[in-house]
Image (spheres, rainbow, N blue to C red):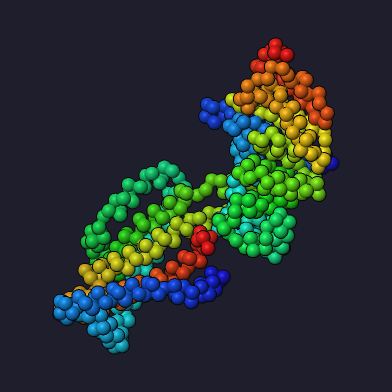
Amino acid sequence: MTLVRNWLASLPAYLWSGWGAIASLLLFLAAWEWASVHYGALILPDPRTAFATLAGLLADGSAGPELAATARRALTGFGLALVAGSLLGLAAGVSMTASMMSRPIVTVLIGTPPIAWLVLALLWFGAGDGTPVFTVFVACLPVVFVGAMQGARTLDGQLRDMARVFRLPPWMRFTDVVLPHVVSYLFPAWITALGISWKVVVMAELLASSDGVGAALAVSRSHLDTAATLAWISAVVGLLLAVEYLLLEPLKREVERWRVAT
Amino acid sequence: MNTPPRLSVRGVGHAFALHTVLENVDLDVATGEVVALVGPSGCGKTTLLHLCAGLTTLRTGRIDNDFARPACMFQQPRLLPWKSALDNISLGLKAAGMPRAERDRRARSLGLQLGLAHDDLDKFPHQLSGGMQSRVALARALAIDPDLLLLDEPFSALDIGLKTELYALLLRHLEARSLGVLMITHDLMEAVRLSDTVLVMAPTPGRIVRRMHIAHPAAQRDDAFVYSTTARLLQDAAVRESFGLAAVEATCSRDAGTAVGAEIIALDDPARTPRRSHRC
């Protein structure tokens, strides 16, 4: 509860500090506009056309369901990876042997391109939700797993001794000693995984699904509709930016306030 | 439960793999008594303290500890970095199940007594200086109202002024209530200033070679007393050998033990007794 209150309280100051970020985003838009003027509207429509197309898509109600479908798949895969990766990673981090054994497997998982998983998933799950969800899950899992494992591996034995001397009951050892440390490793991993899930789901949908942003991108590509393509891309990237910078980053700051030198 | 609580260590030994760090250690800490363990670095002092605190599993010998609430201070403050100073102080109280308002009140008043400012208490450990962190660690140990304090050179990283101040705070606390203290230090003067019994350890393997009882009350010990008593302790051949100092030919342990207010007792150390008697 205090977390939510502090998050709301710190939001204005945080948004004010975002002027620099907004300025750099605007610079990016300027470069886009310049490129559009240089190459012509067919190759690269200017940002305003893209945003207008997006606004049109949103207004006629065709964008909402597609975005919802994509978000559902991305968040399902991400959620599964978050739970499985965190639990498995913590378990592996507790044991030296398990963490040494899991390292090469993680490297294999990270090294396998998502597109390869996608082809396999198509064979296994067909054209339903299963394919994008599985692909997202496999792409996110190793990232979360490594974060959780590092968190558990770097637990401070000195603090554990201190907790024993002061007779902390087991639940307090978990909530007051283990959890805050592990979360400081898990949180960044979760944020990275969320970004990955968002990218991978669009790719999976493009090849495997009949609805969702990826499928809409496939349609606009076949119509050579670059404005719609950029509109969809803007929608996906915009959503990711909003979730990351309005929700996760302030939360992360609040959770890790003890780290920052103020 | 009529007998006052006591910590008694009998014939304790310990080895890490093949390396023997402690051999046949006996010591007692009674309530109201301050016992100092002095010895060079690496003589097994910390291992011994960890055994007493139950942090290391005892393999050889016996440790009977009937103190109900032991508290420990380590060489580093070991504060939880994600908790404010106040929450760190009240950690042991929270573990004991005390409601938040009550434990905050106690932690705050104790923190203020130990020289922390109100706004220091709301800071995180990384925002505090080393001295302030040590105060928080001391407050955390005292907050649970311990009947036994185990101190592992808690102030060794602080400058002499801060160290003296924190020890004075500790002594004041000791006067108010009677509790047993087992402290580790490599500083002989510190041991002589604070303790009723000084146990001198020698390395490889760690064992107690000298026991000095100081009858003079700690509150009345002035610098002159501390200097002269420390000097006497340093004349002792076994103490010198333990710290790797060159032997002083003119004195021997029996002479050193006869001064006022303090008494040095040589312990049976069969390996070394013949050489000492030869020298005297």
The residue positioned farthest toward the top in the image shown:
B278
The residue closer to the viewer here, B35 or B5, is B35
State the residue in front, B84 or A199.
B84
**Split into 4 quadrants, where in the image is the N terminus of chain B?**
top right
Q: Which residue is most to the bottom? A: A60
Q: Is residue B207 left or right of residue A88?
A: right
Which residue shows up at 73% across the image and 19% down it? B251
* Residue B138 in view of the camera: yes
Asked where in the image residue A96 lies, by quadrant, the reply is top left
Q: Quadrant of residue B256?
A: top right
Residue that appears at 51% across and 73% down: A10
Which residue occupies 20% across, 75% down? Answer: A35
Q: Position of residue A56 (x, y in %)?
A: 27, 87
Residue B184 % position (x, y): 66, 37
Tell me which residue sits at (73%, 41%) in the image: B181
**Eyeballing the image, is A154 above or below A215?**
above
Taking the image as shown, residue B105 lies to the left or right of residue A149, namely right
B264 over B166 or under it: above or below: above
